[in-house]
Image: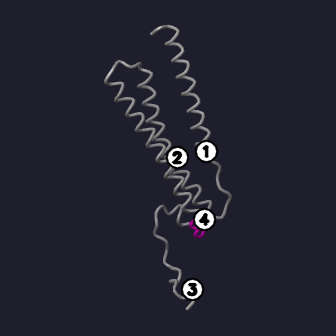
C-alpha cells in the first residue's frame, strides 16, 4: 500500500481560518517556513512581554523608595516599547506569512533597527545620567 493512498484528499472547501487577509490569498506555504515564521513572531512577543514586565518591576521598585524620576520614565518607556513590539510582531508575522503564501520575497525586518537604536539610546542616557550623579554627588 502506498503512502499516498493513506493521505486524505485535499479539501476543496473554502478556508475559514482567520485572518482572511493572510489565509485567503495564495497557496499553502512550506510547513517548516510557516512554523518558523510563527516561532519568530512568538519570540518577539515574548521579548515585548519581558519589556513590559521589566517596566512594571521598575515602577514597583520606584514606588518603594525615593528613586529618581528618570527610573519611572524608563519604566514607562519599557512598558510602552514592549506593547509596541508585540503589535509589530503580529504585523510582521502577517506580512511574512502573506509573502510565503504568495511566493514573494520576504519583507525586511522593520522593528530590529528601531529596537537596537532604542537600546543604544537608553544605554547612552543611563551612562550620562550616572556620570552626572557621580560628578555632582546627588
- Does label 1 or label 3 sit earlier along the sequence? 3
Sort mark 1 into few (<14), some (14-19) or many (20+) by Cα contacts within 10 Å.
few
Mark 4 near mark 3, Cβ–Cβ under 8 Å?
A: no
Mark 2 near mark 1, Cβ–Cβ under 8 Å?
A: yes
Residue at point 42%, 38% (across, down): 52
* Residue 2 drawn at (x, y percent): 57, 89
Residue at point 33%, 20% (across, down): 65
Name the residue furthest right: 105
Sort mark 4 into few (<14), some (14-19) or many (20+) by Cα contacts within 10 Å.
some
* Disc nearest the viewer among 1 and 3: 3
Q: Secondary structure at mark 4?
A: helix
* Disc nearest the viewer among 4 and 3: 3
* Residue 92 drawn at (x, y percent): 56, 51
- Does label 4 or label 2 sit earlier along the sequence? 2
Q: Which residue is mark 4?
A: 101
Q: Which residue is mark 1?
A: 110
Q: Which residue is mark 2?
A: 88
Q: Secondary structure at mark 1?
A: loop
* Residue 56 drawn at (x, y percent): 38, 34
Q: Whole-Å distance between the Cαs marked 2 and 1?
A: 9 Å
Name the residue furthest bottom: 1
Q: Which residue is mark 3?
A: 4
Amino acid at each position: 500500500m502506498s503512502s499516498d493512498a493513506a493521505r486524505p484528499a485535499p479539501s476543496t472547501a473554502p478556508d475559514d481560518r482567520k485572518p482572511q487577509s493572510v489565509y485567503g490569498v495564495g497557496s499553502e506555504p512550506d510547513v517548516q517556513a510557516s512554523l518558523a515564521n510563527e516561532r519568530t513572531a512568538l519570540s518577539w512577543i515574548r521579548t515585548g512581554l519581558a519589556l513590559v514586565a521589566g517596566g512594571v518591576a521598575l515602577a514597583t521598585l520606584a514606588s518603594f523608595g525615593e528613586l529618581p524620576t528618570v527610573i519611572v520614565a524608563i519604566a514607562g518607556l519599557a512598558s510602552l516599547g514592549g506593547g509596541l513590539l508585540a503589535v509589530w510582531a503580529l504585523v510582521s508575522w502577517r506580512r511574512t506569512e502573506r509573502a510565503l503564501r504568495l511566493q514573494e520575497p520576504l519583507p525586511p525586518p522593520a522593528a530590529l533597527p528601531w529596537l537596537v537604536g532604542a537600546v543604544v539610546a537608553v544605554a547612552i542616557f543611563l551612562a550620562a545620567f550616572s556620570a552626572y550623579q557621580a560628578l555632582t554627588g546627588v
